[in-house]
Every structure is written in structure tokens, then in C-alpha cells.
Image (cartoon, grey):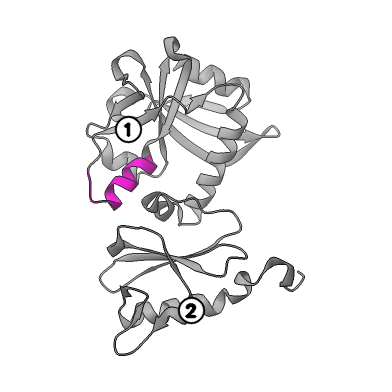
Amino acid sequence: MNEVRALLERHGHIVQEIDGGNDHGEDLHVTFVQNGQRTEDSLAMQVKGGVSTRTRKGHRVPVGDHGGNWRDGSLPVLCVVHDAERGGLFWANATRQLRRAGALRKTAKSIVVSRESVLDDANLDAFVRGMRHYLARERQGVGRWADMADVEFAPTDIVKPFENEVAEPMVFWQRRGEPFAVLLHHDLDWEPVPVQERMLCFEPIPFIGNVVLDIAEAHWLMGCFKSTEWWRRPIEQRDPV
């Protein structure tokens, strides 16, 4: 934990040790700082020594009985491994991995920490930018869906979630300037499906492409297409702001 704390504090971020962290699966609470000012972006970290968690390609941190908290807690949780013999600190987003496993109807017993995911002075700024974007999407209520589908929503993307009457979630995702949108659907294991308005049919039963819909889902999708038409126009043709 001292190595993690020292790295973050050298770059001006706020690090607080969590009492009893080894028992509850979270060791550090981190708040990011920008231009000397505390931001709204915070997360938790579980820190492990490297030798006991080593694998050939990196490390694995056991989930134990922390899976529910790491996946659904109020703060995202990262697993950080210190392995001096392999080069220092390595990290993984435990919350994202657990959400993805759940989307695939699997139970993750450990968090995979890649040897490529190095955490050091050279890449800390990029790490912080990435995590702050991740936390912004969490506040917008769409971060969970990106994790479950294993995709990245850009700041300019339009993302519209929906739940049907049996609480099955789905997401309409429109990238800027793309002629199609992407449907992420619970029943499709969150695999991205490109869709266009012309593919949406209401009779004899509602469907889009090969995806069967109920009537509420079809009307929701139509509303999504109509309200985002301007974002699908080629960028050079879009009306000036």
C-alpha cells in the first residue's frame, strides 16, 4: 500500500487508508485532484503483494466473498498488485470484470491483472484521465452497461438505456457521425448489434434485424432513432452550433 500511496500522492491525489480493509476487500480510498482542486471522482482499491497472486501472464486476485460489493458498491473498485520483481505496480478494474462476467452469466472467482497494465509515474496521467472518464459515465448511469457489453462510450456518444416490463435492460448507443446505431440487449448477452431505423418493423410482430421486440421496446427504439437523427448526419453536414 505504501508504493501505491506514494505514487498517487507524488502526483497530488488524495489517498486514505480504509480501516480494516483486508477484511472488507478495500484497502484505499482515492480521490483525484486536478490543478490543485479536489474533483468529484473517487474510487476504492484492493492492494495485494505480487508473489502469491502470480500467473504466467500476470496476476489473479481472488474475489472471495467481495464480489457483490466490488460489482455493485457505491464506488468502483480496482485491484492493484505490487510485484517489484516484475516491474512494480499493475492494476485491473475489478468492477468492470465482474459486471462483464455477470452479463455472460458467469461467476468470476478472480480478477485478472495483466502484465501490460502497468501503473507508474510515466502513465499515471493517462490512467487518471481514463478513470475520470469511467467515473463520469458511472454518474450518468450508463457505466454499468459499457462494462457489461465490454465497450467504451466516448464523451460525444449518445447513450439511452431502457428497461422493459420484466426489468430486462437494453441500451441504444449512437456514435457521432455514424450512419447506424448500436443496440446492446440483455437477451443477446450484451453483444453489440448495429441497427438502422429502416430495419425496425412493427408487423406482424415487432422486430429489428434478427431481434424480436415487444411493442414497448419497438416504440422506444423508434423514439431513439427520431431523437438522434441529427447525430447520424455526416459531421461536415451538421448544422453549426
Q: Which secondary structure type mostly characterizes the magenta part of the structure? A: helix
The x and y percentages for residue 56 are: 33, 21
Residue at the image point whose x is 23% and y is 51% from the top: 105
Dot 1 lies on which element? strand
Residue type at numbered disc 2: Glu
Question: Which of the two labelled residues, at mark 2 and mark 1, occupies the earlier sequence position?
Answer: 1
18 and 173: which is toward the camera: 173
Q: Is residue 164 positioned above or below 97 on the image?
A: below
Residue sticking out furthest to the bottom: 204
233 and 75: which is toward the camera: 233
Residue 20 appears anywhere in the view: no
- Is 2 included in the stretch rendered in magenta? no
| Residues drawn in magenta | 95-106
Mark seen at residue 197: 2
The x and y percentages for residue 178 are: 58, 65
Q: Which residue is mark 1?
A: 111
Residue at the image point whose x is 34% and y is 31% from the top: 112
Looking at the figure, which quarter contains the N terminus? top left
The x and y percentages for residue 125 are: 62, 31
Residue at the image point whose x is 38% and y is 29% from the top: 113
The residue carrying pointer 1 sits among few (fewer than 14), some (14 to 19) or many (20 or more) residues within 10 Å by Cα, namely many
The residue carrying pointer 2 sits among few (fewer than 14), some (14 to 19) or many (20 or more) residues within 10 Å by Cα, namely some
Residue type at numbered disc 1: Ile
The x and y percentages for residue 204 are: 29, 90
Dot 2 lies on which element? helix
Classify residue 184 by image quadrant: bottom left
